[in-house]
Image (cartoon, grey):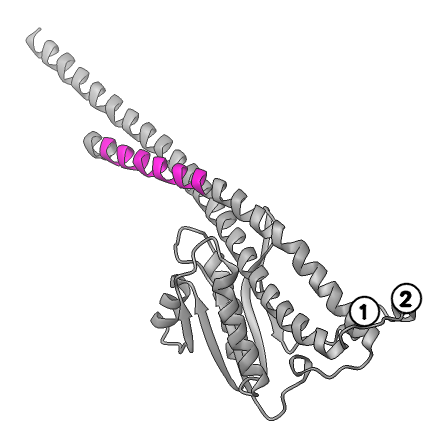
């Protein structure tokens, strides 16, 4: 049986930990709502931009754009991995890093990894994996001006033929109860005409008049589409991180509560045993005197 004084100290320590985890859960809940509002606010723009690009490519016919071409003779990929700067978020980072490692290990050529987040940087350093670049100054509120340079670098390298494709590994946010680690291909952009439903007559019968020319429009819209997709990945990752931290801290708080109950029972049992032993000593002494 554990010493009563030790049980009191352990119970007090667990209670302090429960206060911390409960506070972190409340903070994560508030930050989740703010991150969700930002992600929802950017989604209509990205969806409308993708729809506009599809309509433009379908109406203009076969357009050859550098961002839609397949680079021949190059076996190098670029991968942007989105992790968190702080821990206590369950399996958030582990799932994203596992998806990224699957792409890296499954590709026969070279993969230039641009790691975003201190946890991912530490993981790659510990496992002695090479990184082409690392970014650790993007916090839980990503801004477009922070994401745009990363997207511009990928676009420039792809146009120059240095990489054959560009991908991003992140945690996609579906709902508060479901987030999935995904690998999204940013470049080359898929043939939007092939993605449309060719069996629908309305999708092929519409004629467009362009001013300026479709090539000039695509020169602006396609890079903007890549930047917007990458920024949407950052906002989804930020929301998913707060959800994961909120769930992890709730589980830790509940586990601390269960441990406090167990320690309280052990303390009461030890206290009752001590009282019983003292009574037996008193009774034994009184019996000996009698």
Q: Are marks 2 and 1 in contact (CB under 8 Å)?
A: yes
Q: Residue furthest front?
A: 211
Q: Residue at 56% across / 62% down in the picture?
A: 231
Residue 107, visible in the rendered structure: no
Q: Is residue 137 left or right of residue 198?
A: left
Query: Considering the numbered disc 2 on the image, is that residue within a helix, a strand or a loop?
Result: loop
Q: Residue at 35% across / 33% down in the picture?
A: 260
User: Residue 187 magenta-drawn?
Assistant: no
**Split into 4 quadrants, where in the image is the N terminus?**
top left
Spot occupied by residue 281 in the image (x, y as percentages of width and height): 14, 18
Q: Camera-side residue: 60 or 113?
A: 60
Question: What are the residue bounds of the magenta stretch?
Answer: 8-27
Q: Camera-side residue: 153 or 72?
A: 153
Spot occupied by residue 190 in the image (x, y as percentages of width and height): 70, 75
Q: Residue at 93% across / 67% down in the picture?
A: 201
How far apart are labels 2 and 1 at the CA level? 9 Å
Mark number displayed over residue 196: 1
Spot occupied by residue 246 in the image (x, y as percentages of width and height): 48, 44
Q: Is residue 123 left or right of residue 142?
A: left
* Residue located beneath label 2 in the image: 200
Label 1 packing within 10 angstroms: few (<14), some (14-19), many (20+): some
Q: Camera-side residue: 241 or 49?
A: 49
Q: Is residue 183 left or right of residue 25?
A: right
């Amino acid at each position: 049986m554990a010493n009563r004084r030790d049980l009191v100290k352990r119970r007090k320590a667990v209670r302090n930990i429960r206060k911390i985890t409960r506070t972190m859960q409340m903070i994560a809940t508030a930050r989740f709502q703010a991150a969700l509002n930002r992600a929802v606010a950017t989604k209509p723009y990205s969806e409308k931009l993708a729809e506009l690009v599809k309509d433009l490519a379908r109406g203009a016919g076969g357009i050859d754009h550098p961002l839609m071409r397949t680079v021949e003779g190059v076996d190098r990929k670029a991968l942007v991995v989105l992790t968190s700067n702080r821990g206590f978020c369950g399996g958030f980072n582990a799932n994203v890093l596992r998806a990224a490692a699957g792409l890296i290990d499954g590709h026969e050529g070279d993969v230039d990894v641009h790691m975003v987040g201190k946890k991912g940087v530490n993981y790659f350093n510990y496992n002695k994996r090479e990184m082409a670049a690392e970014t650790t100054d993007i916090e839980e509120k990503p801004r477009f001006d922070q994401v745009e340079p990363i997207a511009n670098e990928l676009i420039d390298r792809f146009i120059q033929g240095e990489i054959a494709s560009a991908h991003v590994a992140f945690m996609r946010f579906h709902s508060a109860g479901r987030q999935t680690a995904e690998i999204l291909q940013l470049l080359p952009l898929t043939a939007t005409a092939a993605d449309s439903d060719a069996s629908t007559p309305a999708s092929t019968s519409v004629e467009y008049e362009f001013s300026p020319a479709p090539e000039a429009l695509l020169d602006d819209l396609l890079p903007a589409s890549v930047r917007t997709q990458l920024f949407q990945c950052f906002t989804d990752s930020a929301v998913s991180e707060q959800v994961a931290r909120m769930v992890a801290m709730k589980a830790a708080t509940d586990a601390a509560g269960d441990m406090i109950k167990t320690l309280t029972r052990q303390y009461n049992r030890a206290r009752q045993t001590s009282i019983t032993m003292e009574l037996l000593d008193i009774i034994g002494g009184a019996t000996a005197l009698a």
